[in-house]
Amino acid sequence: MAKNAFYAQSGGVTAVINASACGVIETARKHADKIGKVFAGRNGIIGALTEDLIDTTAESDDAIAALRYTPSGAFGSCRFKLKDLEANKREYDRLIEVFKAHDIGYFFYNGGGDSADTCYKVSQLSEKMGYPVQAIHVPKTVDNDLPITDTCPGFGSVAKYIAVSTREASFDVRSMALTSTKVFVIEVMGRHAGWIAAAGGLAADKDNDIPIVILFPEIDFDQDKFMAKVKAMVDKHGYCSIVVSEGAKHADGRFLAEQGTRDAFGHAQLGGAAPVVANMVKDALGYKFHWAVADYLQRAARHIASGTDVEQAYAVGKSAVEFAIEGHNSIMPTIVRKSSNPYKWEIGEAPLSKVANVEKMMPRDFISEDGFGITEACREYLVPLIQGENYPPYENGMPSYVTLKNQAAPKVLPAFEL
Amino acid sequence: MAKNAFYAQSGGVTAVINASACGVIETARKHADKIGKVFAGRNGIIGALTEDLIDTTAESDDAIAALRYTPSGAFGSCRFKLKDLEANKREYDRLIEVFKAHDIGYFFYNGGGDSADTCYKVSQLSEKMGYPVQAIHVPKTVDNDLPITDTCPGFGSVAKYIAVSTREASFDVRSMALTSTKVFVIEVMGRHAGWIAAAGGLAADKDNDIPIVILFPEIDFDQDKFMAKVKAMVDKHGYCSIVVSEGAKHADGRFLAEQGTRDAFGHAQLGGAAPVVANMVKDALGYKFHWAVADYLQRAARHIASGTDVEQAYAVGKSAVEFAIEGHNSIMPTIVRKSSNPYKWEIGEAPLSKVANVEKMMPRDFISEDGFGITEACREYLVPLIQGENYPPYENGMPSYVTLKNQAAPKVLPAFEL
């Protein structure tokens, strides 16, 4: 009889992670001879540990199809990283217990770098603990920092949102600059890698001569050089837009705005670089400013998702199931770019041993020599990723996103303390 | 011979103020027998004073049509309020000089409350200074605080943006709440009136049971009551979204976040209520938070403009010209609501004497009894205003907004010191 599958969402959610869930579940439903039920972990891997398994067979085909255009994590996500097998055998024993109890032979884990690490550990269970499970990682991260894959589903939509929003706000500040706001600062996500900040550079193009100054995490902040750049832009254009990454930092490693709190993975929780930069400009140059912090709006903005991104998010979910059916283990479907113009891509695969815990930074030649802009090579890379508008359906003026029933499968095991 | 017209944009710009410009110019072009050239003031009324007149006849019909879907103020706006005639006769003399020199008999001023005041003063020039000019105010303000008109063009699009964004971010935080963010705070515009904040309430509806707590400028902030409300929401739903108006204030009148700076009109410049509220919640209840400040993004977001709003913005521009041709002076076209469900509206008119310097607050019965939400009456008012998606055209993944040539008409007068 066909083994059941476990699917879970992990880490920060995106506008299209549910499109991957849609790809997984729809593809599994088409292969009922190979894959039985798809159980989804309520709140990610925690759902597996606590045996809180959502029975997705209770959801209609229409509801599953609606995941394709619904942002966020429909089954709940979590920030929870499994320790090494040696350090915490108890959790792995429990996973195997739950998998056995529910006849789970496939493990699909939808997340970023930390999650790839968890997925990699699970993929080793066959070998190390004698329980046969095929673990496939489904890539997702707005930060675009997974290695090997050309891009990460989730990134293209944030990139489109930031590019569009920066263009729109730049048009706005241009209108106001003579007597009012001269500098607009937008803070964007990207803890260590400047991919999202780079997307702000797409606000300008050959038809839109918009002055954009970008502060990348990859480039140490140099206040004098930055002020000179902003002043030159305002002198020339009358105004300037600044895109600052939440991860922008001083030469000594301090973030421009560190709140002093840390998330569950121990990463510094950032936010507030925009007001810091805006006030710095005001103090040095006297320009009136406005600032915005996009925060969750950017990664949840399914209303302006990239068509390419939605398609790729679905494709990695679908391919994960197909790879599993073909017998693969410990891999991640990747996006392989065949050409940029015209844009052509296909699905490839990467071994999880090479994905887990590796962060892909912006190549230095994607950042302009002065450190404040993007190069043509970067533009050539980014532009295909924001192609296409994939609008959700609207009802009564609002996008009609689905909320699933999320019925739990009956528990058969004793409770487990996290 | 047909008199020329002067059109200018004033105050903060919106996603649809250019749709009004489009309505003015396209309608004037259709009535070439009645209206000669349309000159646009570069940077609003400053363009009139400095004789910096943009000759819109240099723009193609296609470029003018593209204004309908281009956010911001295509001719530049300004924050500049004419003093009373008695206090500053020099500026009015100059206006008349410029109008005479360019044979201007129509004055279309596109703005909010302060601009309605300027327009009203100009409309008195015939009577007080013997120069015949018909002055029509074209309503525009995201704050929705103009009297008499049912709504202000610009508001519906911000409302839609905030409603959609709050729903999307709420889905996001719901996904994260178990192990991470439990409270999401979004700060929205609205200096004195809570209309935009109210729109955040539309994120929830009968199909979307989302816990939303709104902080209105109309309701004095009561920290204990607020914390009790947030705690009750998180206890029940596991998470909570908070929409805070930039104008939310303490009982003693202090804004939750006053930066201490003032704009050119002497209004306090606000910003930063979201981090204040988020940290307050963290300190009192310990919840992990995220916060966003939408700032210009909300009013520039033409990509998610309300179809109703775009249509009404165009209509008030068109009607302004038609009223002028019919000989009206000192009026403002208004939106008159005939019914809410189905939504029916038509254009009316209001005398500027009753519009200038009057602010329309939220009626108390639009705010729930506890002060943290919207009532059914408010919902019935708001829902029609966000109907319809009027997407701009895209090219290469980005909205193709127009930047006009903005050629200046030759100056014939001596320079004028502002």
Image: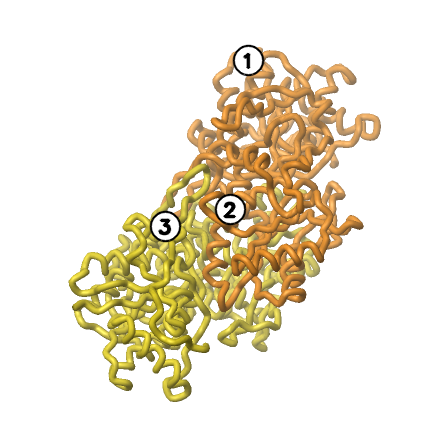
Chain colours: A orange, B yellow
What's under tag 2, amino acid-wise? Ala
Horizontally, residue B221 falls left or right of residue A112, namely left
Q: Secondary structure at mark 3?
A: helix
Neighbour tally class for label 2: few under 14, some 14-19, many 20 plus, Cα within 10 Å: some
Q: Residue at x 25, y 69 (%)?
A: B349
Horizontally, residue A268 falls left or right of residue B342, namely right
- Where does the N terminus of chain A fall, quadrant-wise? top right
**How far is disc 2 from disc 3 in space, using C-alphas?**
18 Å
> Residue A367 location in percent, x, y?
64, 41
Q: Residue at x 27, y 64 (%)?
A: B336
- Where does the C terminus of chain A fall, quadrant-wise? top right
**Residue A34: mark in rendering:** 1
- Of the residues tagged 2 and 1, which is closer to the observer? 2
> Residue A63 location in percent, x, y?
45, 32
Residue hosting label 3: B69
Neighbour tally class for label 1: few under 14, some 14-19, many 20 plus, Cα within 10 Å: some
Asked whether the beta carbons under mark 2 and mark 1 sit within 8 Å of each other, the answer is no
**How far is disc 1 from disc 3 in space, using C-alphas?**
50 Å
Looking at the image, is B359 positioned above or below residue A119?
below
Residue projecting furthest to the right: A86
**How far is disc 2 from disc 1 in space, using C-alphas?**
49 Å
What's under tag 3, amino acid-wise? Tyr
Asked whether the beta carbons under mark 1 and mark 3 sit within 8 Å of each other, the answer is no
For the residue pair A159 and B256, the one nearer the viewer reads as: A159
For the residue pair A193 and A36, the one nearer the viewer reads as: A193
Residue projecting furthest to the bottom: B86
Q: Are marks 1 and 3 on the same chain?
A: no
Q: Earlier in the sequence, mark 2 or mark 1?
A: 1
> Residue A116 location in percent, x, y?
68, 28
Residue hosting label 2: A204
